[in-house]
């Protein structure tokens, strides 16, 4: 099975631990074990757990805790995975066969764009429109959706735009899957990282053709323990478990235990508050930074997530601009072309404020030089 390179992930894993300032992340500054201990994680208990295999679809305790977050679900609706990326992958393995079509919201985290292609499916796109507050292009959506569509993939809140679908947009997407017997994979890993709005409504419960994918990596700020999950129809979730048996068997036993602490509603609220506090502070700094260029950037403020997606007014390609910034300033950001949108940049909003300001100053110096060159 051939798969095209996942450009953004490869660029990140090549450079993110080498550069001085990694501003390519989409996660807030991650939580430490010490912080989790303050939330009630009993390290003595972790110390004594035999490091054996965990329940491969997630322990009953963790699936019970998750099912309480998704009303109407039972533990049989849930598969715990190694990150939400594994959840997306397992669903694609189960749902797709060669010749199927996938309808892919764009711009987006491009994992399933590559995975669907590698499984012999063709990928059609519906765009979010930058000049219309990232509202979906409904004409394109209606044209691309058909009886050949196996699933629609969206991230909501969206990576990289930070936009959130309106209630009417959600209903339209669900009506689309119902009409054509397709499925929806709603990747909700940024749910809980809203800046001003209330928590993003989940697609969970809107149709039994919906699969919600989520995990601890983004709004919870705990990517390192690699816990994600799928919630959906038990018979398909069961098939995901079978795929899981062949791929990684299951999640790590310590991570499962830590996840039980993180998803407890009281702790979850504290983790979300931590995330909102970090990105809320940085968002103001970022707004001033964008304004300081007087017109170089066009920027729709994100509604959620630890990322800003900005358009710039210059004819340099986004890959060349990112390479230039990295070479001359030791700061890594993501070119818009990794999301199919050249002349855009994705910049992380999740670092501690002092690092964030220092990195922005470096980027500004380089862009000022670029502007001066004409
Ligand atoms: C929308 C989306 N889904 C999934 C992932 C992968 O996250 P995880 O660390 O949970 O595998 C990312 C990472 O950036 C993402 O943006």
Image (cartoon, rainbow, N blue to C red):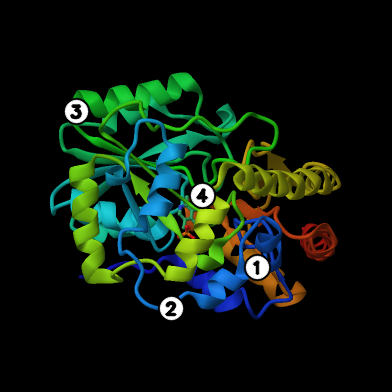
Point out the tag, 1 or 2, that comes first from the N-terminus: 1
Element type at marker 3? helix
User: CA separation, marks 1 and 4?
Assistant: 37 Å
Give the labeled residue for mark 3. Answer: 180
Query: Which of the 4 image quarters holds residue 163?
Result: top right
Q: For marks 3 and 4, give the one nearer the viewer.
A: 3
Few, some or many C-alpha atoms within 10 Å of disc 4 (few <14, some 14-19, many ≥20)?
A: some
Give the labeled residue for mark 1. Answer: 33
Disc 3 within 8 angstroms of ligand 1 (CB): no
Task: Return the x and y of residue 191 as percentages of the image width and height.
Answer: 54, 41
Point out the tag, 3 or 2, that comes first from the N-terminus: 2
Q: Nearer the viewer, residue 292 or 22?
A: 22
Point out the tag, 4 or 2, that comes first from the N-terminus: 2
Point out the tag, 3 or 4, that comes first from the N-terminus: 3
Element type at marker 4? loop
Q: For marks 3 and 2, give the one nearer the viewer.
A: 2
* Residue at (70% x, 44% y) in the render: 273
Task: Return the x and y of residue 280 as percentages of the image width and height.
Answer: 76, 43
Element type at marker 1? helix
Give the labeled residue for mark 4. Answer: 341
Whether residue 280 sits left or right of residue 112 in the image: it is right
* Residue at (63% x, 43% y) in the render: 266
User: CA separation, marks 4 and 2?
Assistant: 48 Å
Q: Find out whether the residues at labels 3 and 2 contact each other: C-beta distance under 8 Å.
A: no
Few, some or many C-alpha atoms within 10 Å of disc 2 (few <14, some 14-19, many ≥20)?
A: few
Disc 1 within 8 angstroms of ligand 1 (CB): no
Q: Nearer the viewer, residue 95 or 205?
A: 205
Whether residue 324 sits left or right of residue 211 in the image: it is right
User: CA separation, marks 1 and 3?
Assistant: 46 Å
Q: Which mark is residue 50?
A: 2
Task: Return the x and y of residue 43 as percentages of the image width and height.
Answer: 61, 70
Point out the tag, 1 or 4, that comes first from the N-terminus: 1
């Amino acid at each position: 099975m051939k798969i095209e390179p996942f450009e953004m992930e490869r660029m990140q894993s090549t450079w993110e631990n080498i550069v001085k300032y990694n501003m390519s992340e989409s996660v807030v500054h991650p939580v430490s074990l010490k912080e989790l201990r303050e939330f009630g994680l009993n390290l003595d208990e972790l110390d004594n757990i035999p490091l054996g295999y965990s329940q491969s679809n997630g322990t009953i305790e963790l699936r019970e805790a998750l099912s309480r977050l998704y009303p109407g679900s039972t533990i049989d609706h849930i598969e715990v995975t190694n990150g939400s990326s594994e959840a997306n992958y397992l669903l694609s393995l189960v749902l797709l066969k060669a010749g199927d079509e996938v309808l892919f919201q764009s711009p987006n985290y491009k994992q399933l764009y590559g995975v669907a292609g590698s499984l012999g499916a063709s990928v059609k796109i519906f765009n979010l429109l930058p000049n219309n507050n990232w509202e979906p292009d409904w004409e394109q959506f209606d044209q691309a959706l058909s009886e050949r569509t196996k699933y629609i993939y969206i991230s909501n809140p969206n990576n990289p735009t930070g936009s959130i679908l309106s209630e009417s947009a959600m209903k339209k997407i669900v009506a689309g899957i119902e009409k054509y017997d397709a499925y929806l994979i709603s990747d909700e890993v940024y749910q809980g990282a809203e800046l001003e709005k209330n928590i993003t409504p989940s697609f969970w419960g809107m149709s039994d053709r919906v699969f919600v994918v989520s995990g601890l990596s983004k709004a919870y700020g705990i990517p390192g323990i690699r816990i994600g999950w799928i919630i959906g129809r038990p018979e398909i979730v069961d098939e995901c478990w079978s795929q899981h048996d062949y791929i990684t068997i299951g999640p790590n036993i310590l991570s499962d235990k830590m996840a039980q602490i993180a998803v407890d509603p009281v702790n979850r609220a504290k983790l979300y508050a931590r995330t909102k506090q970090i990105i809320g502070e940085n968002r103001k700094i970022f707004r001033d930074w964008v304004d300081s260029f007087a017109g170089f950037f066009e920027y729709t403020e994100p509604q959620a997530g630890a990322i800003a997606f900005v358009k710039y007014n210059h004819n340099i390609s986004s890959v060349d601009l990112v390479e230039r910034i990295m070479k001359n300033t030791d700061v890594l950001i993501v070119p818009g072309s990794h999301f199919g949108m050249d002349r855009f940049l994705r910049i992380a909003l999740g670092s501690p404020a002092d690092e964030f300001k220092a990195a922005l100053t470096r980027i500004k110096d380089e862009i000022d030089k670029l502007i001066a060159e004409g």
